[in-house]
Image: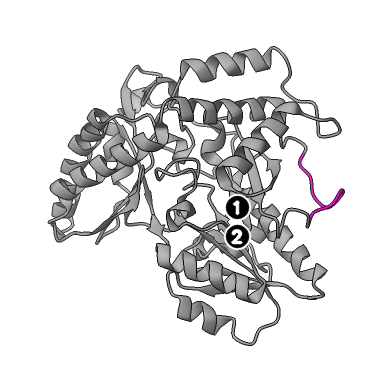
Amino acid sequence: MNAAAKPPSSPHVMPTYGRLPIALSHGQGCRVWDEQGKCYLDALGGIAVNTLGHGHPRLVSALCDQVGKLIHTSNYYHIPLQEQLAAKLVELSGMSNVFFCSTGLEANEAALKLARKFGHNKGIAKPEVVVCEKAFHGRSIATLSATGNAKVQAGFGPLVEGFIRVPINDIAALEQATKNNPNVVAVFFEAIQGEGGVNPMDASYLQQVRQLCDQRDWLLMIDEVQCGMGRTGKWFAHQWAGIVPDVMPLAKGLGSGVPVGAVVAGPKAANIFVAGNHGSTFGGNPLAMRAGVETIRIMEDEGLLARASQVGEHLRAALERELGSLKGIKDIRGKGLMIGVELSVPCSELISRAAEAGLLISVTADTVIRLVPPLIMSTTEADEVVAILAPLVKQLLSEKGAA
């Protein structure tokens, strides 16, 4: 984008984001346009948020209808749409109860509060939660303390106590880190780490952790904020392992762009919170609940879980063909439409280069290209992603002597 076409700066907005010089004005399907009329193929989906892409006619119609009825009332009153969405999430998850909030951070914060109260109810004065290296659970004081990223934590100490950190996919390390510790109350991790570099948990590891939690009376809490809601080809990524957690935070794709967060709880955790223990002003408001209800309904009607599996497999195979043999490519991994391409060198400049070429992506953990497009993406569009991205990756690797 040339300097003359750059959007104006934002002197009154806190400089918390390293934004590209692009202002998007509208979208349709998997494409968005900026204020200068340039078109981009969206392989980022608002960071795994825009499940149904942009401008989906059924979602637009439903939201317009709801805005004309009720946007917000507060949880002083019963909200029928909240009951409807909760019942659907219980059905899809095999769990039992739901608390609604507005973001993934809030959902994860609520999960940590559940774990602590679970411990206090058992007489544990200082409950401890096991978390993972490279994890990302949010930027509140508690969730950044649970996060395994020193950059996120820098400048915000002292951190919240009560976390035990272990490597992923290593049951022996988990057992050793918690040996003879009566204060442990929960194990908390992402089924597929997002910000940490698109790192999946092995199915066997998930099964082993579920068994360990059952043996030791711990809560199994699985963060599905980024990898849930059909992104991997099942409603929730942990379902590939055939297990059910006790606590499951959700957000991002649940509302297709309308802020919605949720904590789904199984029988072991469903009644830990009682009136007055937790709340959210905006959580579960009618507009957000309508977005969640309609998102799931459209996903079911359009077979988007199957599409996520099919198109994700197609996209991964195409990336393997184009890039897999290069020495500068360390790994191509993920599940469904949550894919990471790990390079041997830092590659954050690919974000702007891809945008210049008409493709929206992100880079996480410094060296991992993250692709989390809308679940409506077609195989033709997946091929277009590879056609734009692969030459840029090859050029970057060549420039850095890593090709």
Residue at position x 42%, y 26% in the image: 302
Quadrant occupied by the N terminus: top left
Residue 20: percent from the left, percent from the top? 40, 36
Is 98 located above or below residue 332 in the figure? above
Residue 80: percent from the left, percent from the top? 75, 27
Give the residue type that dot 2 points to.
Answer: Met
At mark 1, the secondary structure is: strand
* Residue 153 shown left or right of residue 385 in the figure: right
Answer with the quarter of the image where residue 84 lies: top right
165 inside magenta stretch: no
Instruction: Please name whichever residue, 271 or 133, is drawn nearer the observer in this view of the structure.
Output: 271
279 inside magenta stretch: yes
Q: What stretch is highlighted in magenta?
A: 273-280
Is 255 located above or below residue 368 in the figure? above
Instruction: Please name whichever residue, 396 or 181, is drawn nearer the observer in this view of the structure.
Output: 181
Residue at position x 28%, y 37% in the image: 354
Circle 2 residues within 10 Å: few <14, some 14–19, many ≥20: many
Please report contact status of discs 2 and 1: CB closer than 8 Å, yes or no.
Answer: yes
